[in-house]
Amino acid sequence: MKNGHGRVSTLLTHDSSRRTAVALKLRKVDYTKKGHLAYVTIRNAEHENCLEEEVDHDLWKVWHDFRDDPGLYVAILTGEGTKSFCAGSDLRAYVERIANRSPEWNRRRAHEGPNLGGITKGIAVWKPIIAAINGYCLAGGMELAMACDIRIAADHAKFGVVNRRWNVGAESGLTQRLPHIVGLGVALDLLITGRWFDAKEAYRINFVSRVVKRTRLLDECTKLAERICEYPQSSLRTDKEACIRGLGLTLEEGLRLENTLWNTNLSLPDTLDGPKAFIAKRKFVPTQEV
C-alpha cells in the first residue's frame, strides 16, 4: 500500500512477520518487523547464542531481506534470553569445519557468504543496525557487534577476546574493526591478553556508546531506533556509507567519496525540502524517498 508521498508503507503485523520468517525458512533466528523496525534475535540460547552454520545462514538471509525491504529503516540485533548476546563461534562446529572442509570452501564461506553472523563480510547494508548486547559478547560475538553501527550494553554484559586461550585467530573483524573503534593500543591489549572486561570498561573505551539496566535494554534500543526512523533516510544512509567505505582511504580520496555520495541525493525531494522547511520555520515531514 502506498501512502500520500507515493512510497510503500510496511506497517506489518506479527502475523506478517511470521510469514516472513517462514518464507525465509529461518530455524535459529527470530525476525520480526514492526513498523519501520526489524528485530533480529539469535535463538541459540542453549549454546550461549553461539554462531554456528545454521545461525550464520539464517542471519545471512535476514540481512539481505532487511537491506532490500524499502519499508524497513533500522534493525535491532540481540540474543535470546538475558545471559548472552553472542558468545562467538561454536567451537565444536568450528573444529569439524576446519578439519573436514577444504581451505577453498572456508575462503568462499568467509568472503562470499554466509560469513560469521551474516554481516561481518561480503554484504553492504547502509541502513543503521543497533546491537542490543544483553550478556556475554565474546570473540566472534564482539566481531558481530562491531559489524553493527551502534552498540548499547546491558549493565551485566561481559566482553573478551577469549578465543586467545584456544589458539583461535580472528577472521571476521577483530583485528580490523576493533582498532578503529577503541584505538590501536587498547585493541592490542584486548587482543593479546584475551582478558575479560565488563560493561563499564566497554563504555570507557568506547566499545559501546551506552550502558543501561538489563530490564531497559530493548526499550532503550527501540526508543533510539524510532527516533532514527523519524529522520530523512537518504542522507543518513549515504553518510554511513561514506564513513565505512572511507576507512583506509586517504583524506583526499575520502572527501571525494563523501562528495560523490552526497551528489546521489540531489535529485531526491527531501534534499531541498528539508532546508526549505528550516528556512520557513515549519515542521519537515520527509518523503523518505531513497
Image: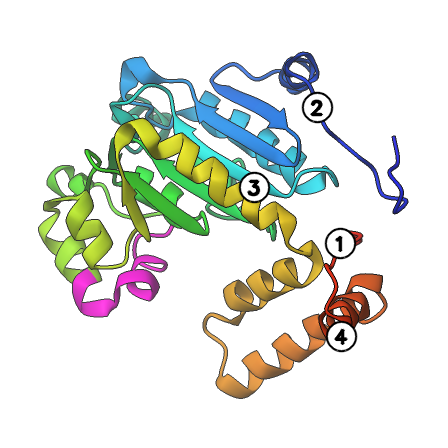
Q: Could you tell me which residue is drawn at 67 percent across and 38 percent down?
A: 72
Which of the numbered marks, if any, corresponds to residue 226?
A: 3
Marks 2 and 1, the one that precedes in the sequence: 2
Chain part drawn in magenta:
172-186
Marks 2 and 4, the one that precedes in the sequence: 2
- Mark 2 or 1: in front is 1
Gap between marks 3 and 2, in whole Å?
15 Å
Quick one: SS at disc 1? Answer: loop
Quick check: is 184 in the magenta stretch? yes
Q: Are marks 4 and 3 in contact (CB under 8 Å)?
A: no
Q: Residues within 10 Å of mark 2 (few under 14, many from 20)?
A: some
Quick check: is 137 in the magenta stretch? no
Q: Which residue is mark 1?
A: 285
Q: Which residue is mark 4?
A: 263
The residue furthest front is: 281
Q: Could you tell me which residue is drawn at 75 percent across and 54 percent down?
A: 285
Gap between marks 2 and 1, in whole Å?
21 Å
Q: Position of residue 16 (x, y in %)?
A: 70, 16
Q: Are marks 1 and 3 in contact (CB under 8 Å)?
A: no
Q: Which residue is mark 2?
A: 12
| Visible residue check, residue 194 | yes
Q: Position of residue 241 (x, y in %)?
A: 59, 62
Q: Amino acid at mark 2?
A: Leu
Q: Quadrant of the N terminus?
A: top right
Gap between marks 1 and 3, in whole Å?
15 Å
Question: Along the line of sight, which residue is nearer the eye, 145 or 156?
Answer: 156
Q: Amino acid at mark 4?
A: Asn
| Visible residue check, residue 101 | no
Gap between marks 2 and 4, in whole Å?
33 Å
Q: Amino acid at mark 3?
A: Glu
Q: Could you tell me which residue is drawn at 16 percent across and 54 percent down?
A: 190
